[in-house]
Image: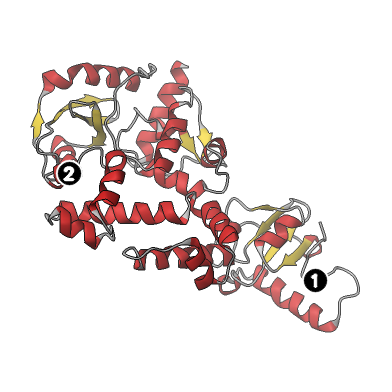
Amino acid sequence: MMTNAILNQSEKPEMATNQETRYWQAVSTRDASLDDKFVFAVSTTGVYCRPSCPAKRPRRKNVEFFSTPNDAEKAGYRACLRCRPAASGGNLQIRTVKAIARYIERHLDEPVTLSRLGAEFQLSPFHLQRTFKAVLGVTPRAYADSCRMNQFKSSLRAGRSVTNAMYEAGYGSSSRLYERTASQLGMTPDKYRRGSIATLVRYTCAGSPLGRVLIAATDKGICAIQFAESDEELEQGLKHEFPFAVRRRDDEAVAPWKHQLLQQLRGKELNGTLPLDIQATAFQRRVWTALQAIPCGQTRSYGEVARQIGQPAAVRAVARACATNPVAVAIPCHRVVRQDGDMGGYRWGVERKKALLEMETASA
């Protein structure tokens, strides 16, 4: 595991020894100011860390230093799960992708090609796209499309006209806009602007083992499943998601779906044919489909889901897709946990996530 180490363990010149001493001092004191300067690896564990890692300090004789996480991984080490040095904000690859993302966001109204990005960041188009996708899970073009759509939706929710919202979001023509809205909005832009006024959203609230739950549906299927402490909180959440819609409480119309959901909350497998009417990006849909394939009573790590959809480096993007899931339980994002077994986050509260897993495990 000595390949690419900054400092060879034999015949070190005095300058290298001084640098090694400074690095070890930074590790000993957990100096976060040097997190972007180097990583240290421990031969007895096969793990590399940032200088500020909170883990127990190793013996000096078992430590070697590397300029970048990539160098450490080439030498056979794996990233620490506590300090996550490969995902550090100081990592050059992460910083580069963040800079590319900010650049895309500032130029949504312009054609930002891979060639243009490559020239701007002095990278080959192929390497730039591969690096960007490895970090965020989507290509630069898909990221730009997602940013435009989010800005477009925000403008529509604010009451702007479709035309104004279209140009503010960077769409050059109505044809470009309409070819994307069918899959991402699930309706025409004008209907979305009016909060899908023409599409009635019926909902019901009920008690459950996890507190109050709201199930909302359009004529096409369930569009929201939310948990909260009170019906008022649930109704406010639905209003935020569908600000201009006709939201009507209709306990009878939603009763069949409510019955199925409550069965799941009591530990029984949810009917896989339950109709859903949700909007999603291509990446979100891939993640959510993978989540629905996780058997009741089992869990997967965010990394395992990322590998399952063919994007092993998109762990953070998988976590974001889980966090934006609008239909709790129907898309079982609660079955995804951290690599070390920790619960991780949950949109409706970690305690609910823990309770759901316990019920499913008990009934499996």
Question: Observer-nearest residue: 209 or 335?
Answer: 335
Q: Residue furthest bottom?
A: 15
Residue 296, compared with residue 21, is above or below; it is above
- Packing grade of label 2 (10 A; few <14, some 14-19, many >=20) is many
Q: Secondary structure at mark 1?
A: loop
Mark 1 crowd level (few <14, some 14–19, many ≥20, 10 Å Cα): some
Mark 1–mark 2 Cα distance, whole angstroms, equals 59 Å
In percent of the image, x 40 and y 37: which residue is there? 285
Indicate the amino acid at tag 2. Answer: Tyr
Please give the label number shown on residue 108.
Answer: none
Q: Residue at x 25, y 56 (%)?
A: 173
Residue 66 lies in quadrant: bottom right
Residue 78: image x %, image y %?
68, 51
- Residue 208 appearing in the image: yes
Q: Secondary structure at mark 2?
A: helix
Give how far across and how far down residue 265 sits, in percent: 33, 22
Name the spot of residue 218 as percent of width and height, x first.
Answer: 18, 29
Residue at x-position 73% and y-position 53%: 77
Q: Quadrant of the N terminus?
A: bottom right
Q: Amino acid at mark 1?
A: Leu
The x, y position of residue 234, in whole percent, is: 18, 38
Residue farthest to the right, as pictured: 11
Residue highlighted by disc 1: 7
Q: Residue at x 48, y 27 (%)?
A: 294
* As drawn, 48 above or below 319: below
Q: Is residue 91 visible?
A: no
Seen from the viewer's position, the closer of residues 171 and 34 is 171
Query: First in sequence: mark 1 or mark 2?
Result: 1
Judging by the rendered image, the residue that carries numbered circle 2 is 192
